[in-house]
Structures are given as structure tokens and as C-alpha cells.
């Protein structure tokens, strides 16, 4: 799986780099190179399934914008609560997760301002004792999550939008009591974007 993730990242940056190379601005007597890159940040409150239960999550990303249509984001996401549903019911165990991510996104040439994104990353899924809070089992996993998002309203410097995606988890075979079907999930989120254009 790491080779596939590496290939996806290389394809993403190969697509973005031509836009970056063309950003040169004429300024009268001389030519001043300009990267044309700007930064923004966003936060997301989301919901997803984990081990048969619905849990909330919080995510944050720092975005680098390449032109008007492409951007790359670096961030992370963490579950705000734990799940003891499904195969963990009555076991005294709760599942939790957290991960670091890289996201490539492109604005689609369609009405409505839709944006398509692909997120890759790595993190950990852990099983914790529900009474003591100690970690009994943990596994490093890989993440692949395509998504669609749209901005709906602008409140001063803040854009409010929504995001929907599907998250595949790879590498969880060593985690006791949970299978891939307990971790793969539809993701929903409300996004607040801070972008000083």
C-alpha cells in the first residue's frame, strides 16, 4: 500500500507543478518572478462510523493554493469520542483513531462551486480499556479518502461549506476484534474556511 500512496502523491504534484511554473508577473522595467501561491486554513467538524458506532471528529488543514483551481492541504483529524459498538459491545473496550493527512484538491469546472479532493495519510486505530483508559492494542494504518465539497455561505472572512467522502483504511489486519469493514466509512463534515484573498 505505501507504494500506491507514493504513486498517487507523485501524480498529484506532477499535475500541480505546471501551474506553479507559469506564474511570472511582468512589472514594467523588469520581470519579477511570483510564485502565485497563497495560504489558507480550515477546520472541519465531522461524523463517521467506527466499529458500528457513530463518532464525531475534528480536523484542521493548512492549504497552499496554486492558482485558482488547485490546492494542497496538510493537516490531521482525530476522533472526539470513542466507540464501543459492534464487535466491541460488552467487551469493556473502546475504539479511537487519529491520523495525519495530505490532501490534493481541484475545483471542478461545473456550476455550483464543487471541489474534488483526494486525501492520503497515516495514523493509528487503538483499542482502550473503557474504565482505566489504558491502551490495550494499537495498529498503524494507511488512509485513502476521496471527497466532494462545496462552499455555501460567506460570513465575513469565513466561508462555510460541507464535505462528503468515503474513507478506506488499510493495514489494520493486526488489530484484534476489528476488521476493515469496521473501519471503512462514509464521512460527513461542516467546514469553516479562513482565506484572506
Image (tube, helix red, strand yellow):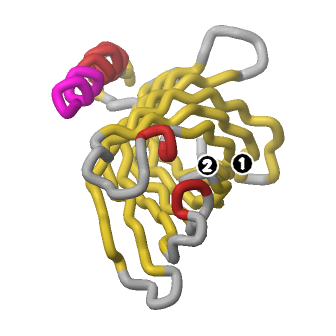
Q: Which numbered disc, 2 or 1, marks the residue that appears first in the sequence? A: 2
**Residue at the farthest bottom position:** 132
Q: Which residue lies furthest to the left in this view?
A: 3
Query: Residue 107 at what x, y percent from top left?
Result: 58, 21
Q: How crowded is mark 1: few (under 14 residues within 10 Å), some or many (20 or more)?
A: some
Q: Is residue 6 magenta?
A: yes
Determine whether, in the image, residue 165 is placed left or right of residue 179: right
The correct choice, above or below, for 39 with respect to 163 in the image is below
Is residue 45 something one can see in this rendering?
no
Instruction: State the residue in front, 97 or 84.
Output: 84
Q: Give the range drawn in magenta.
A: 1-9
Say which residue appears at 28% left-offset and 57% top-offset: 139
Element on which disc 1 rests: strand
Residue at mark 2 to residue at mark 1: CA–CA distance = 16 Å
Residue denoted by label 1: 190
Residue at 41 percent of width and 44 percent of height: 179
| Residue placed under numbered mark 2 in the picture | 49
Residue at 33%, 74% in the rendered image: 136
Disc number for residue 10: none
Q: Nearer the viewer, residue 105 or 135?
A: 135
Q: What element carries label 2?
A: strand
Which image quarter holds the C terminus? top right
Q: Residue 61 in the image: x percent, y percent? A: 48, 51
Amino acid at each position: 500500500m505505501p507504494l500506491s500512496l507514493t504513486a498517487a502523491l507523485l501524480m498529484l504534484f506532477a499535475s500541480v507543478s505546471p501551474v506553479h511554473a507559469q506564474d511570472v508577473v511582468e512589472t514594467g522595467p523588469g520581470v519579477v518572478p511570483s510564485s502565485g501561491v497563497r495560504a489558507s486554513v480550515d477546520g472541519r467538524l465531522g461524523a463517521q462510523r467506527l466499529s458500528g458506532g457513530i463518532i464525531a471528529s475534528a480536523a484542521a488543514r493548512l492549504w497552499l493554493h496554486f492558482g485558482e483551481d488547485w490546492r494542497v492541504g496538510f493537516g490531521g483529524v482525530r476522533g472526539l469520542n470513542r466507540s464501543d459498538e459492534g464487535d466491541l459491545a460488552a467487551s469493556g473496550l473502546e475504539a479511537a483513531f487519529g491520523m495525519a493527512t495530505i490532501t490534493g484538491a481541484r475545483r471542478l469546472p461545473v456550476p455550483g462551486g464543487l471541489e474534488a479532493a483526494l486525501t492520503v495519510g497515516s495514523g493509528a486505530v487503538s483499542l482502550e480499556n473503557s474504565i482505566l483508559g489504558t491502551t490495550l492494542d494499537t495498529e498503524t494504518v494507511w488512509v485513502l479518502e476521496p471527497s466532494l465539497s462545496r462552499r455555501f455561505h460567506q460570513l465575513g472572512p469565513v466561508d462555510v461549506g460541507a464535505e462528503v467522502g468515503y474513507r478506506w483504511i488499510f493495514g489494520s489486519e493486526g488489530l484484534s476484534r476489528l476488521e476493515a469493514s469496521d473501519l471503512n466509512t462514509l464521512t460527513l463534515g461542516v467546514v469553516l474556511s479562513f482565506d484572506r484573498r
